[in-house]
Image (tube, helix red, strand yellow):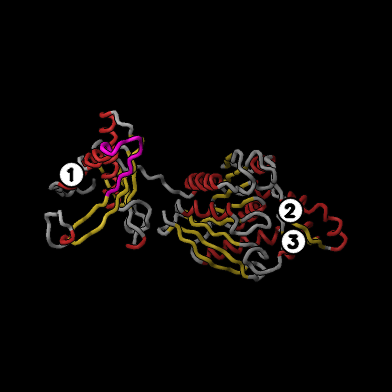
């Protein structure tokens, strides 16, 4: 499914303008999710961007934003704390609600996970909550500036390096995270909870996932991220989170899993997907495919176009035919690659064509045959390509009959 991304902004609880980005499918969204990034990170950190794109490609729009004083948002980070982050999350939900798309899912990464646990109860439309590598309490982050604590206590603030960048941490920040306990909020969620955590997370230990899971009531689920790092810097880990999250959330969003389109052996059934203008489900016997048109003609580019599928059939048939012939001859053919393109040309430009007026279809086919083949063998394979059954069908007279199925089928 094609994904679009747009910039937007909204007012945080302190009145500052907060920068946001909304990823959504080009067609209809099943639901909207709200994503909270990790401590001192931004909305554009790889994990947030990749998970948002992954969910949007599966029909779930995602709003991610920079907390006050971070990224492109206004305000001073030094004047923020955990409670203000929670308030910003609620403000983001309020903004989505004003657009008529209140979030059904809230997702938080690291300290953002703790924030969504605290904020979820204030977002009545949310039915599902997911945390990724989240601490069980926000006070977990205080170890990051423990060395500066005496200065913070004495002067009221200190500059500390976090992820290689300087941040001013004030005493009120420490007091806020130490005063916040999440067990009660977790136990009173009354929403489905999914806890993602890597057993070897060196930043937020796995015991935090155990505390969150233990404090929550059902329905609750836990998914191990195996050897993923805390920031999900590997693409496959972020993609996995998006895939699992989308499948899990579907149960709580009331998304009925559509029955796969069925086709008897030897037949093809094509049915509108109900997504976008042109998207189609295709069943070829037991196999499921998808077809669509490109963006340039009003489609969503969620699958190959009709002519792409025709060329795919010709290319597959060509490759299979060459393979069968080479094996029968005992030739050392290692691999066949067929590249095809389709165009409309003027008949007068085709010297070998019977049609001499108007326009006709032309498929250009190029073969790459690999292996220790001599020139004579290569020339023979080129001749055999024209003998593949689909090639013969395309160049012969084809009769297509069309009828209507009885209503109700």
Residue that numbered label 3 is attached to: 167
Q: Secondary structure at mark 1?
A: helix
Magenta segment: 365-377
Residue that numbered label 2 is attached to: 180
Question: Residue 343 vs residue 197: left or right?
Answer: left
Q: Looking at the image, is 394 positioned above or below residue 125?
A: above
In this rendered view, identify the residue nearer to me: 332 or 19: 332
In this rendered view, identify the residue nearer to me: 185 or 388: 388
Residue 10 picture location, percent across and down: 58, 68
Residue 227 visible in the displayed image:
yes
Q: Looking at the image, is 407 positioned above or below residue 317?
A: below
Residue drawn where x is 86% and y is 59% of the image: 151
Q: Looking at the image, is 380 positioned above or below residue 295?
A: above
Q: State the CA–CA distance, disc 1 to disc 2.
A: 72 Å
In this rendered view, identify the residue nearer to me: 236 or 325: 325
In this rendered view, identify the residue nearer to me: 123 or 1: 1
Q: State the CA–CA distance, disc 3 to disc 1.
A: 70 Å
Residue that numbered label 1 is attached to: 393
Residue 99 picture location, percent across and down: 50, 66
As for residue 370 lying within the magenta part, the answer is yes
Residue 317 visible in the displayed image:
no
Residue 35 picture location, percent across and down: 58, 56
Question: Residue 237 vs residue 167: left or right?
Answer: left
Foreground label between 1 and 2: 1
Instruction: Specify which label sits upstream in the sequence, 3 or 2.
Output: 3
Residue 182 picture location, percent across and down: 69, 49
Q: Secondary structure at mark 3?
A: strand
Question: Residue 96 vs residue 172: left or right?
Answer: left
Residue drawn where x is 21% and y is 56% of the image: 361
Total tally of numbered discs in the picture: 3
Instruction: Specify which label sits upstream in the sequence, 3 or 1.
Output: 3
Foreground label between 3 and 1: 1
């Amino acid at each position: 499914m094609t994904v679009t991304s747009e910039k937007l902004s909204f007012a945080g609880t302190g009145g500052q303008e907060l920068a946001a980005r909304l990823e959504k499918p080009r067609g209809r969204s099943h639901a909207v999710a709200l994503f909270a990034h990790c401590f001192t990170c931004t909305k554009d950190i790889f994990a947030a961007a990749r998970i948002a794109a992954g969910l949007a490609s599966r029909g779930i729009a995602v709003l991610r934003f920079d907390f006050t004083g971070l990224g492109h948002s206004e305000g001073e980070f030094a004047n923020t704390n955990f409670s203000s982050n929670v308030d910003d999350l609620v403000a983001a939900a309020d903004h989505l609600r004003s657009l008529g798309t209140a979030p059904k899912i809230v997702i938080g990464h690291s300290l953002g996970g703790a924030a969504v646990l605290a904020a979820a109860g204030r977002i009545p439309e949310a039915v599902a909550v997911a945390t990724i590598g989240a601490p069980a309490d926000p006070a977990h982050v205080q170890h990051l500036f423990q060395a500066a604590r005496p200065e913070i206590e004495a002067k009221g603030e200190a500059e500390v390096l976090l992820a290689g960048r300087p941040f001013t941490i004030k005493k009120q920040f420490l007091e806020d995270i130490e005063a916040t306990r999440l067990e009660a909020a977790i136990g009173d969620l009354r929403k489905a909870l999914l806890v993602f955590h890597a057993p070897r997370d060196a930043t937020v230990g796995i015991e935090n996932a155990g505390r969150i899971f233990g404090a929550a009531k059902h329905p609750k689920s836990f998914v191990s991220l195996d050897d993923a790092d805390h920031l999900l810097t590997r693409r496959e880990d972020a993609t996995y989170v998006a895939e699992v999250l989308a499948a899990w959330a579907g149960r709580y969003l009331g998304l009925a899993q559509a029955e796969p389109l069925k086709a008897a052996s030897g037949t093809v059934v094509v049915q509108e997907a109900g997504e976008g203008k042109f998207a189609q489900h295709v069943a070829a016997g037991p196999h499921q495919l998808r077809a669509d048109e490109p963006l340039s003609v009003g489609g969503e580019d969620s699958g190959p176009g009709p002519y792409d599928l025709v060329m795919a059939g010709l290319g597959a048939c060509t490759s299979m035919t060459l393979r069968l012939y080479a094996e029968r001859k005992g030739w050392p053919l290692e691999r066949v690659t067929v590249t095809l393109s389709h165009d409309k040309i003027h008949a007068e430009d085709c010297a070998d064509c019977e049609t001499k007026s108007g326009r006709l279809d032309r498929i250009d086919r190029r073969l790459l045959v690999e292996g220790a083949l001599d020139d004579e063998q290569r020339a023979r394979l080129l001749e055999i390509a024209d003998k593949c059954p689909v090639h013969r069908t395309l160049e012969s007279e084809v009769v297509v009959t069309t009828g209507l199925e009885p209503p109700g089928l």
